[in-house]
Image: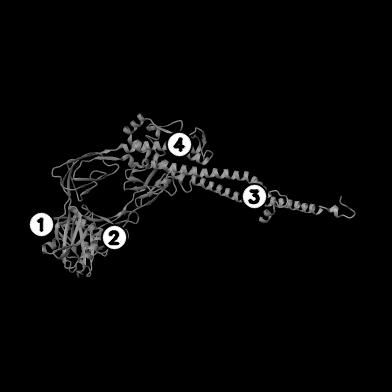
């Protein structure tokens, strides 16, 4: 090509190189202009979709509090300055009211010191097992006397090896997650182990060494150790916090209290000595009101952005400007769908406030929202619960034995009402022992050993469990059995637990798994002969009852039951909801459950669909990207065609130059030819 170009103009004297370039540019210009216009339009659409996505995300952020029921259950507390009580947190939905609290005493944790060693890391040489049970002590003077086991707390069993030191023993206890804190203290040159139980009068410790243990006598804290004058020393007794709330005495085992005034968590610091702390918890409607006003403002802002993108607007010079998505059907359809949802009734809300217009929010001619202050104020003051139902996500049940929850697939659940029937209540596996008759007419002493067994709970078999107390009644043995079983390491590892009961009418101990379902079952094995005394031996009449999974239908279709949880059929409209069933639900017959996303959840779900990876916007952007790729391909094709065109016309001009050069050569050779011809003379 360069050889051709360098040859141009050589004969004619015309600047044919420039002429070829200009002709090529003239040929390229209209085609390239069409590609430039096309590319500019597509790039503007991509940018406009970015603006649209940003506007949707901003609007969705404002929707988040509206879809949360906590917004409509907000509370405020007027609490005085005081060193007696420290407020920690106030939850949405906290019980409203006025309260007066007087602190009589604070909760204390039992502390024990035990063991003596010159070196905290030297082996103690002790072996065996320490069983730590939790409960309430009565005292004879300063010595422990009677112990009532707290069956709500599992026992802690600590295996002691000959190589263990005070420090390794403390480490074992601290790793147990039992609530007991262990530390090694230096007291006058001697190291001792200090144990601190969880606070509260019913969380004191009874520590007993296993049969055959050696070197552990000084670590025991029980009646026998007190009588023998050996064992641990109590440095602080356990006690409950005692306070009066509106004149009612309340006792708790901790100084951080979260279950007296529902939703209000506070800590008592010291007795108030006659000082009464007065405060009130009130509903805070201002949070919800501001969220609704923010929603209206954010929607109008989004609508303005959307109109500028898909319609026509005026610039600063009052010129009409067409939006970059004015001809984009996808963008217009998305905005129309969102506007339609804002103006329509909320799916799943059957009565009360079903649309924004019910609380005074109107749609103007231009599509924007406005608030009728009089109607809005009336709705907020007189029908606040209905306002919450309109905006917030909610699941409900007409059966008091059924709770409706929302799972991870709730985004696909169709709002509405569903008919449910429980055909089989869930049940827990259980075991009933034989009657103990008049066994407890006299105290039963098991401290000599021989009362051992293993228990299987939901398929997991425990270690050997041994009774070692003196039981004056069935209740003391019942609580001890529950504490020992639930403290077993094998059962704790799989979270297998039982509730031990005693039926006074039949004289039977019962063991009930805490899990529902077909896999829930309880059985005893390897019982010693003495266990027949309490109706739990191999020779006793033991009655086992297997657990059951819940069964039922949702809208006439069989649902999946697992334990006490009933799940709708996979892919059904109700899928995403989960029903927690309590025994007694079947007796209620057919009932209704309902689900509504509320306006907040409904709009959030719609925008999620718009912005999803496979959503309408992503699909449209992908299509625009493909068109941009086509523009790039067309440019490459144009470059190739123009190169061919330039080559072709350059060759044509070269041929012309050669002809002209040939003619010039011929003309030069003819100069003076007449003078050289014979018989001619020059005048």
Judged from the image, the secondary structure of the residue bearing numbered disc 4 is helix
Q: Give the distance between the C-alpha atoms of the residues marked 2 and 4, in whole angstroms.
A: 63 Å
Q: Nearer the viewer, mark 3 or mark 2?
A: 3
Q: Which residue matches tag 3?
A: 642
Q: Give the distance between the C-alpha atoms of the residues marked 3 and 2, in whole angstroms.
A: 83 Å
Q: Which residue matches tag 4?
A: 304
Whether 372 is drawn above or below 653: the answer is: above
- Is disc 3 in contact with disc 2, using a CB cutoff of under 8 Å? no
Residue 456 in view, yes or no: no
Whether 417 is drawn above or below 647: the answer is: above
- Tell me where residue 97 appears, x and y as whole percent: 24, 38
Residue displayed at 33% across by 54% down: 547
- What residue occupies the far top of the structure in this picture? 374
Earlier-in-chain disc, 2 versus 1:
1
Q: Nearer the viewer, mark 4 or mark 3?
A: 3
Q: Give the distance between the C-alpha atoms of the residues marked 1 and 4, in whole angstroms.
A: 81 Å
Judged from the image, the secondary structure of the residue bearing numbered disc 1 is strand
Q: Give the distance between the C-alpha atoms of the residues marked 2 and 1, in whole angstroms.
A: 36 Å
Q: Which residue matches tag 1?
A: 140
- Mark 3, Cα crowd under 10 Å, few <14 / some 14-19 / many 20+, is some
Q: Nearer the viewer, mark 1 or mark 4?
A: 4
**Location of residue 300 (image quadrant):** top left
Earlier-in-chain disc, 3 versus 1:
1
Side of 666 relative to 172 (left or right): right
Q: Which residue matches tag 2?
A: 491
Earlier-in-chain disc, 2 versus 4:
4
- Is disc 1 in contact with disc 4, using a CB cutoff of under 8 Å? no
- Is disc 2 in contact with disc 4, using a CB cutoff of under 8 Å? no
């Amino acid at each position: 090509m360069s050889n051709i170009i360098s040859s141009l103009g050589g004969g004619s004297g015309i600047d044919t190189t420039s002429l070829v370039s200009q002709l090529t540019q003239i040929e390229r210009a209209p085609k390239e202009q069409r590609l430039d216009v096309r590319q500019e339009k597509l790039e503007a659409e991509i940018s406009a979709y970015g603006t649209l996505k940003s506007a949707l995300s901003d609007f969705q952020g404002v929707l988040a509090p509206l879809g949360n029921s906590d917004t409509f259950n907000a509370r405020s507390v007027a609490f005085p300055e005081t060193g007696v009580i420290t407020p920690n947190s106030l939850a949405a939905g906290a019980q409203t009211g006025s309260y007066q609290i007087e602190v009589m005493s604070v909760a204390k944790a039992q502390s024990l010191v035990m063991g003596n060693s010159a070196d905290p890391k030297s082996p103690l040489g002790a072996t065996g097992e320490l069983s730590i049970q939790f409960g309430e002590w009565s005292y004879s003077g300063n010595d422990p006397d009677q112990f009532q086991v707290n069956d709500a707390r599992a026992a802690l069993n600590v295996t002691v090896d000959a190589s263990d030191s005070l420090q390794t023993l403390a480490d074992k206890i601290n790793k147990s997650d039992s609530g007991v804190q262990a530390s090694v203290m230096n007291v006058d040159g001697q190291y001792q182990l200090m144990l601190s139980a969880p606070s509260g009068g019913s969380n004191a410790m009874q520590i007993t060494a296993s049969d055959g243990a050696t070197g552990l006598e000084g670590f025991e804290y029980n009646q026998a150790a007190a009588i023998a004058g050996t064992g641990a020393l109590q440095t602080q007794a356990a006690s409950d916090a005692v306070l009066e709330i509106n004149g009612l005495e309340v006792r708790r085992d901790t100084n951080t209290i979260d279950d007296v005034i529902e939703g209000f968590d506070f800590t008592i610091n010291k007795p108030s000595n006659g000082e009464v702390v007065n405060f009130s918890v009130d509903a805070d409607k201002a949070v919800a009101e501001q969220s609704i006003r923010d929603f209206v403002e954010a929607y109008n802002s989004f609508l303005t952005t959307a109109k500028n993108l898909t319609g026509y607007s005026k610039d600063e010079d009052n010129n009409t400007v067409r939006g970059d998505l004015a001809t984009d059907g996808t963008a217009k359809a998305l905005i129309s769908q969102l506007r339609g949802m804002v103006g329509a009734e909320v799916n799943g809300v059957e009565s009360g406030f079903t649309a924004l217009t019910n609380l005074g929010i109107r749609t103007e001619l231009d599509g924007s929202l406005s608030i009728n202050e009089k109607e809005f104020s009336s709705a907020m003051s007189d029908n606040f619960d209905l306002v919450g139902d309109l905006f917030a996500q909610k699941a409900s049940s007409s059966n008091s034995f059924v709770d409706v929850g929302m799972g991870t697939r709730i985004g696909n659940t169709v709002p509405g009402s569903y008919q449910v029937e429980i055909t089989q209540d869930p049940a827990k596996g259980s075991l009933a022992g034989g009657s103990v008759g008049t066994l407890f007419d006299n105290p039963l002493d098991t401290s000599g050993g021989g009362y051992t067994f293993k228990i299987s709970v939901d398929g997991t078999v425990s270690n050997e469990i041994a009774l070692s107390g003196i039981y004056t009644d069935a209740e003391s043995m019942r609580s001890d059995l529950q504490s020992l079983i639930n403290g077993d390491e094998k059962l704790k590892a799989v979270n297998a637990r039982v509730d031990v009961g005693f039926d006074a009418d039949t004289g039977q101990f019962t063991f009930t798994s805490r899990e529902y379902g077909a896999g829930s079952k309880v059985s005893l094995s390897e019982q010693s002969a003495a266990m027949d005394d309490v109706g739990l031996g191999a020779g006793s009449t033991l009655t086992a009852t297997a657990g059951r999974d819940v069964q039922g239908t949702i809208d006439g279709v069989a649902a999946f039951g697992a334990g006490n949880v009933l799940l709708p059929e996979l892919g059904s409209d109700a899928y995403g909801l989960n029903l927690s069933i309590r025994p007694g639900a079947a007796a209620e017959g057919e009932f209704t459950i309902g689900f509504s996303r509320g306006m907040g959840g409904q709009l959030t779900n719609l925008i999620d669909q718009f912005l999803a990876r496979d959503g309408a916007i992503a699909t449209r952007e992908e299509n625009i990207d493909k068109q941009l790729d086509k523009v790039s391909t067309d440019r490459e094709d144009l470059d190739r065609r123009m190169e061919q065109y330039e080559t072709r016309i350059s060759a044509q001009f070269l041929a012309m130059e050669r002809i002209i050069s040939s003619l010039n050569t011929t003309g030069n050779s003819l100069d003076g030819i007449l003078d050289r011809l014979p018989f001619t003379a020059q005048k």
